[in-house]
Amino acid sequence: MAVDPTKYITLAEVKRRLEIPFAETTWDPDIDRIIGAVSRWIDARCHRQFFIADDTRAYTADWPDLVRIDDVLTVTQVATDLNADRTYETIWDPLDFFLEPHAAAWHGKPYTRIRPVPYRGHRFPAHWQGVQVTGTFGYALAPPDEVREATLLQTARLFKRTDAPFGIAGSLELGQTVVLTRLDPDVQTLLGPLMRIDRLVA
């Protein structure tokens, strides 16, 4: 089976964690579906994607000198639509803009903002989706270990619900129960530092 880069762990990793024999394939489609669902849930929770994708995306500028964008590793083109006709006719020279945070690449982090270089004559338009950005989007070239472990923990938790009536595992008689419908607290701890605060919506 080809590796899907949008899924942050593999089927084999989940089966190893759950101690399911590799030769046992009955649950493989279910596990693979859960892996995909958890991967997208993590993206949504953290307000960022942890796989890379070459893409062209449009944004609305925050200010004439600032536009916040999705996580990006490299930007190959910035263009602007000056008359709101959804045609990005003004292509910026690479010397006309810079990416922030300045030291993002040095620290292994993505860029999240674009600013025009002062005195170069460019400003971002104020209208909706007036800025077009082409580049390689994503948090990093590979998912961080925290994301991989969070995906593994939550995938295993959801899969175990198939053996847990009403989402409760353990022995009611012995008072040893675990509610599996809740988010694993270790997952919250792992993902907390990776959430994009500037993308939170009240």
Image (spheres, helix red, strand yellow):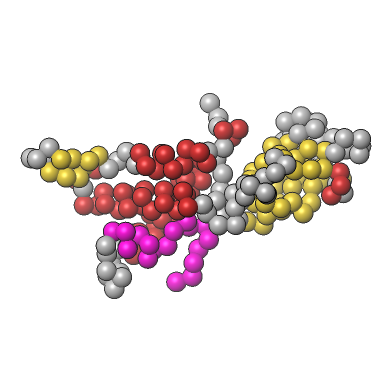
Residue at point 72%, 31% (across, down): 62
Q: Quadrant of the N terminus?
A: bottom left
Residue 121 position, x and y percent, is 92, 37
Give the vertical position of 141 relative to 68 (above or below). below
Where on the picture, by quarter, is residue 29?
bottom left
Residue at point 37%, 65% (across, down): 12
Residue 167 falls left or right of residue 155: left
Give the vertical position of 156 relative to 129 (above or below). below
Number of numbered labels in the structure image: 0
Residue 173 position, x and y percent, is 7, 40
Give the vertical position of 24 relative to 115 (above or below). below
Residue 164 position, x and y percent, is 21, 48
4 magenta-colored: yes
Residue at point 51%, 46% (across, down): 43
Residue that extends furthest to the left in the rendered view of this protein: 173
Residue that extends furthest to the top in the rendered view of this protein: 202
Residue 22 position, x and y percent, is 31, 70
Part of the protein shown in magenta: 1-18
Give the vertical position of 54 relative to 168 (above or below). below
Where on the picture, by quarter, is residue 69?
top right
Residue at point 47%, 49% (across, down): 147
Note whether residue 120 is visible.
Answer: yes
127 magenta-colored: no
Residue 137 falls left or right of residue 160: right
Note whether residue 87 is visible.
Answer: no
Q: Nearer the viewer, residue 120 or 105?
A: 105
Residue 44 falls left or right of residue 90: left
Residue that extends furthest to the bottom in the rendered view of this protein: 23
